[in-house]
Amino acid sequence: MNHVKIEIGSVGENPNEREDIVFIFHVGPPKSGTSTIQSDLSQPKIKNLLRQDNYEYIGHNKGVLSHKRLLRRNETSGRIEFSAEFKDVISEQRKIGRNVLGSDERYWNLCPEKAEEWRKMFSKLHIVLTYRRTHSFLPSVWNQNFKNKREKGNPPSSHKDWPGINHDYRIPSFPEHFAKVYYEKPFPHLVRTSYNYWKKYADRFTLVNFHEEDPTTNFLCKAVIGANNTCALMRIKKKEAQEFPSTVKNPSVNLDYDMVAVHAYEIGLVHRTHRRRAVARAVQEHAAATGISFPQKCLDTRELDHLYRRSLADEAWAQSMFGEWGAGPSRSDAPSMSIDADVDLLGAEELAEFNADW
């Protein structure tokens, strides 16, 4: 079986609208190339290519898929409903029989009541997940969480004050963060969690491998069914480095400069009247001028072993569930797989590829 098929009802009030259009929904999870994919799909040339393959890309959280207003409770009826704006967009695409493509990582999990509305809205709801190996995913999440100051009730901002001043704080090293949050604690991969959230409501899943070729080209070729012209042209142009340059959005930031600056402050080499960002910038400029780099503190042996086995278990899950990347699940339910998953679930080539990336 190439995909999970669930018989679900369709919704359509206008006899001139086709109810059987496909809605392909890329739901992340975060830190798996989603920002880059969304930025690329928003390019007019790529949107036009998709239209030639009968797909309309309707954007992500800044458009009709806005997480804050897409699905809200009707004050009169008490029911969860899609926004009028979203309904109008879908109605227009149904009238011309065009499939729809959307992407937003904020929907990697969803409460059952809202997920049920998706099931009612589309008779063909295809969920796309992007898989990034755990040992690559966790450092990226650490960087995302700490590259900005995060204070409850306030939007993220830069670290401009020394630790203890105006609620600012020291950025922990990745090993410190790993030991506190992940070591010897259950942390299922977000792809596995997202699959379990959506499996009751989608009629097809596709898992796209983050580690294969250009993220956007891989996504278009593996996840957007029937977009053959778009896929072929993207691969040609990417190979020739023409027309469709990927724009990496939401990139990781080198946190070393700030961490060195804070360490200097903590041991008394820098006075509190010096600005944190100015000291970090001076460290960065010195490193660039002298060519020095800062060695990364590594996880200890036990932590490394824990991360390796956890990452390997997630890899085995992905391979056993989806087989070839870009295919739908090969079984109806996720296997129960512990951190000590049997590595025999991975073939020799798959294990070698995993170890090479490790």
Image (cartoon, rainbow, N blue to C red):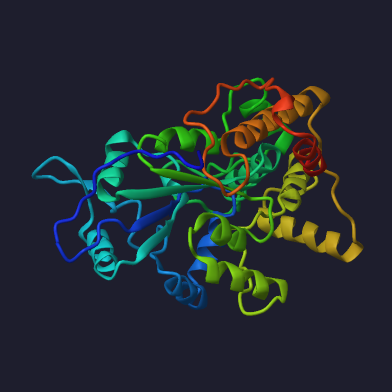
Q: Nearer the viewer, residue 187 or 242?
A: 242
**Left-right relation of 180 to 100:** right
Name which residue lies at 64% across and 26% down. 180
Residue 18 sits in quarter: bottom left
Residue 142 rendering spot, x and y as whole percentages: 64, 42
**Left-right relation of 95 to 164:** left
**Left-right relation of 204 to 239:** left
Whether residue 332 appears in this view of the structure is yes
Residue 270 rendering spot, x and y as whole percentages: 76, 48
Name which residue lies at 66% across and 20% down. 184
Q: How many marks?
A: 0
Q: Residue furthest front?
A: 1
Taking 253 as reference, is 153 above or below it?
above
Name which residue lies at 44% across and 53% down. 104
Residue 84 sits in quarter: bottom left
Residue 12 rendering spot, x and y as whole percentages: 18, 55
Q: Quadrant of the C terminus?
A: top right
Residue 357 rendering spot, x and y as whole percentages: 78, 44
